[in-house]
Image: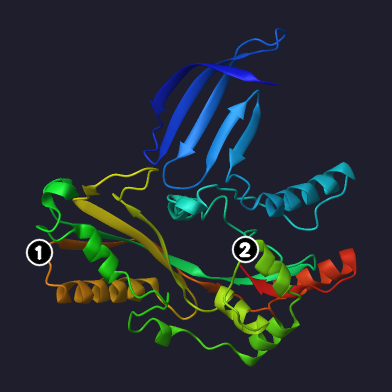
């Protein structure tokens, strides 16, 4: 069914991190009346959702949908069979993980003596399988997300007029972001990483992982043996540059010298890294490199997300129960993997 947009109406949500656009649309089916169409954009993530005729549609809105629905359908099956659940189940479903889950910690603390009381085990459904073989997730890398802002001239300048007479913020920013190898140059980062245990190394060897399929899926990858590649995916810290705010990125040409540019990058955390220490290490390192440039521009470094890594004990009773349940349900023992 096709719809014709009639009138866009922009509104602001109470939550400043979300922008709400409402459209009134007319159905091209004469049997349908005009319906309200809601288009929701989270400015700080890749999530786009719209509501049409009572249905939710979205790009980036399916994160963890399958694991969450698996739990819901399991409860539904018990209800359909008029069977009592063997344990009490409480659901916490929140969709702001990609923006830092702001407010989640405060909500949990506020409800710790009510909704979250008498909770023995917590199961996180942010997980996946490397193949069609079932797997239980026992760890995930954390994340420290940074903004590195370099500010220079009072305003954007034209390169044809001012080029060569100012120290450009973009040049400074690129100069402090590191070398082309992608290696983490910050002192103390790699030294904090807990070594892989023999047991973990053995688990990596036993995991069913199709290297050719992985290469076809992403187009290219660092040519490493399977165990080393999995270790780089799961147990080693990495640095990724996600973008530069203030830079010209639209199609075509523009000869602007930005007055201020902000790099957005993150460092994935693994045991035994501490986000508070990583914040200090990154800030000190970038300022030391920037100082060597003797630039008149100003550098500001901010950590906006500091999520710790998580690694569980695969011999915990909860994992033992999971192994038994999967074996009983599909007659296959699960692998253990990271997220």
- The residue wearing badge 2 is 218
Q: Residues within 10 Å of mark 1 (few under 14, many from 20)?
A: some
Residue pointed to by mark 1 = 296
Task: Identify which residue is drawn at 70% across, 55% down.
Answer: 67
> How far separated are the C-alphas under marks 1 and 2?
41 Å
- Closer to the camera in the image, 205 or 104: 205
Q: Please provide percent x and percent y for residue 157.
A: 16, 47
Drawn side of residue 18 relative to residue 187, left or right: right
What secondary structure is found at the residue carrying circle 2?
A: helix
Work out whether residue 103 or residue 132 is closer to the camera in this orientation and state it.
Answer: 132
Location of residue 209 with respect to 124 vertically, above or below:
below
Seen in the image, is 132 located left or right of residue 218?
A: right
Q: Residue sitting at 67 percent across and 81 percent down?
A: 226
Q: Residue 92, percent across and down?
A: 60, 50
* Identity of the residue drawn at 45% across and 55% down: 105
Residue 330 falls in which quadrant of the image? bottom right
Q: Are marks 1 and 2 in contact (CB under 8 Å)?
A: no
Q: Given the current orientation, which residue lies at the most extreme bottom position? A: 198
Q: Residue at x 40, y 25 (%)?
A: 11
Q: Residue furthest top?
A: 30
Q: Is residue 86 above or below residue 322?
A: above
Can residue 17 be seen here? yes
Quarter location, residue 4: top right
Residue 158 visible: no
Label 2: few (<14), some (14–19) or many (≥20) C-alpha neighbours in 10 Å: few
Image coordinates of residue 275 in percent, x first then y, are 38, 71
Instruction: Tell me: 152 left or right of 182.
Output: left
State the residue lying farthest toward the front. 160
């Amino acid at each position: 069914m096709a719809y014709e947009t009639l009138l866009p109406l922009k509104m602001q949500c109470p939550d400043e991190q979300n922008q709400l656009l409402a459209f009134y649309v007319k159905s091209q089916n004469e049997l349908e009346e005009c319906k309200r169409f809601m288009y929701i954009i989270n400015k700080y993530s890749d999530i786009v959702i719209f509501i049409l005729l009572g249905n939710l549609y979205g790009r980036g809105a399916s994160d963890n949908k399958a694991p969450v629905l698996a739990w819901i359908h399991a409860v539904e099956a018990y209800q359909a069979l008029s069977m009592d659940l063997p344990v009490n189940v409480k659901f916490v479903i929140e969709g702001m993980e990609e923006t830092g889950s702001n407010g989640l910690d405060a909500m949990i603390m506020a409800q710790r003596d009510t909704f979250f009381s008498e909770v023995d085990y917590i199961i996180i459904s942010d997980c996946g399988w490397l193949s069609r073989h079932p797997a239980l997730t026992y760890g995930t890398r954390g994340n420290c997300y940074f903004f590195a802002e370099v500010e220079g001239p009072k305003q954007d300048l034209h390169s044809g007029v001012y080029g060569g007479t100012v120290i450009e913020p973009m040049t400074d920013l690129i100069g402090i972001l590191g070398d082309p190898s992608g290696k983490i140059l910050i002192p103390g980062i790699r030294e904090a990483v807990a070594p892989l245990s023999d047991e973990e190394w053995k688990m990596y060897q036993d995991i069913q992982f199709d290297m050719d399929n992985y290469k076809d899926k992403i187009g290219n990858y660092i040519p490493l043996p399977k165990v080393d590649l999995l270790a780089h995916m799961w147990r080693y810290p990495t640095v990724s540059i996600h973008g530069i705010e203030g830079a010209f990125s639209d199609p075509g040409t523009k000869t602007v010298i930005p007055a201020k540019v902000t790099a957005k990058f993150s460092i994935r955390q693994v045991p035994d890294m501490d986000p508070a220490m990583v914040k200090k290490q990154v800030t000190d390192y970038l300022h030391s490199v920037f100082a060597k440039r003797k630039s008149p521009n100003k550098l500001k470094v901010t950590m906006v997300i500091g999520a710790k890594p998580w690694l569980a004990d695969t011999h915990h009773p909860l994992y033992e129960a999971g192994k038994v349940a999967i074996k009983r349900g599909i007659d296959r023992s699960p692998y253990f993997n990271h997220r």
